[in-house]
Amino acid sequence: MKNICFWLLLCCSFSAFAQSNYHTVANLPYYPEDTKQDAYQASQCVLDVYYPVGKKEVATVVWFHGGGITGGKKELPKALQEKGFIVVGVGYRLSPKVQSPTYIEDAAAVAWVYKNISRFGGSSKKIVVSGHSAGGYLGMMITLDKKYLQVHEVDADSIAALVPFSGQAITHFTIRKENGIAEKQPTIDAMAPLYHVRPNAPPITLITGDRNKELLGRYEENAYLWRMLQLVGHKQVQLFELQGFDHGTMVEPAYPLLLQVLKSLQ
């Protein structure tokens, strides 16, 4: 477990990877063409691909946006651009228009990346799953509970790394709300990443804000996940607490940690 100061994070330099032209392809549907979809699914289940032109075997980060599973929209974080990597910004369905596990099933986006990223110079062996808050939770669920990607014939164990920013490790508060459970009533069931700890999961880097500033015990949830993964025999899990930063402000100082993971794959 590591406490990271802001100035130390900013020491990371990725200028050597930035010397390239970049292009963005927007609003690519990620469910198979033969999937029966309503208008909402068709509008939400699209992704954007930002990639360096002319590169091969590039590492990719699949980014799920935050917003409590009730808001937000797909994004290509500026801090991840012009660093030599592919960034895939995913849109997904939101509550209350849909309920659990529909938005987790939109893990189909990661399966699409596996099957299509080579078109953009990416490697299916270098795919990192990340996102902030609700996006971190979704990434944790699809990585730890293998069934969501198995439906699309993708083995979650082949994910190169999972790097959630302040993801919820217990059952997400929006899912609890859908089931009449108060947001401050901790629940660990099949909708909790903690429920699915296993020794053979991909390498995991958990990042949260300051335990005294985070949202509703988010640091402690991640610390519990970190500990339980270790106890079941997972060998490549680490936890970073960004002291002085709350749930929202922890995002910017967390990006360099994600970039270091991506750089390690190049």
Image: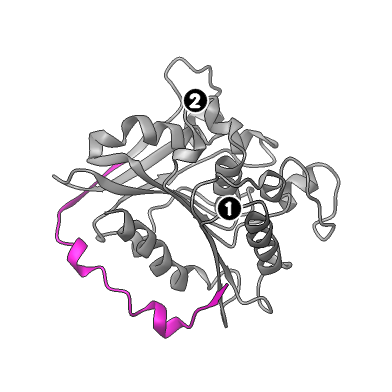
Q: Position of residue 52 (x, y in %)?
A: 20, 50
Does residue 17 show up magenta in the picture?
yes
Question: Would you name the residue on which mark 1 appears?
Answer: 234
The 10 Å Cα crowd at callout 2, few under 14, some 14 to 19, many 20 or more, is some
Question: Would you name the residue on which mark 2 appears?
Answer: 152
Alpha-carbon span between mark 2 and mark 1: 25 Å
Which image quarter is the C terminus in?
bottom left
Range of magenta residues: 1-25
Write the residue at 32% across / 53% down. 265
Q: Is residue 142 visible?
A: yes
Q: Amino acid at mark 2?
A: His
Q: Amino acid at mark 1?
A: His
- Find residue 178 and report its image quarter: top right
- The reply, left or right, for residue 101 in relation to residue 6 is right
Judged from the image, the secondary structure of the residue bearing numbered disc 1 is: loop
Does residue 235 show up magenta in the picture?
no
Position of 120 relative to 203 (above/below): above
Write the residue at 86% across / 45% down. 180
Write the residue at 26% across / 35% down. 118
Q: Position of residue 20 (x, y in %)?
A: 15, 56
Q: Nearer the viewer, mark 2 or mark 1?
A: 1
Q: Report the disc number at residue 120.
A: none
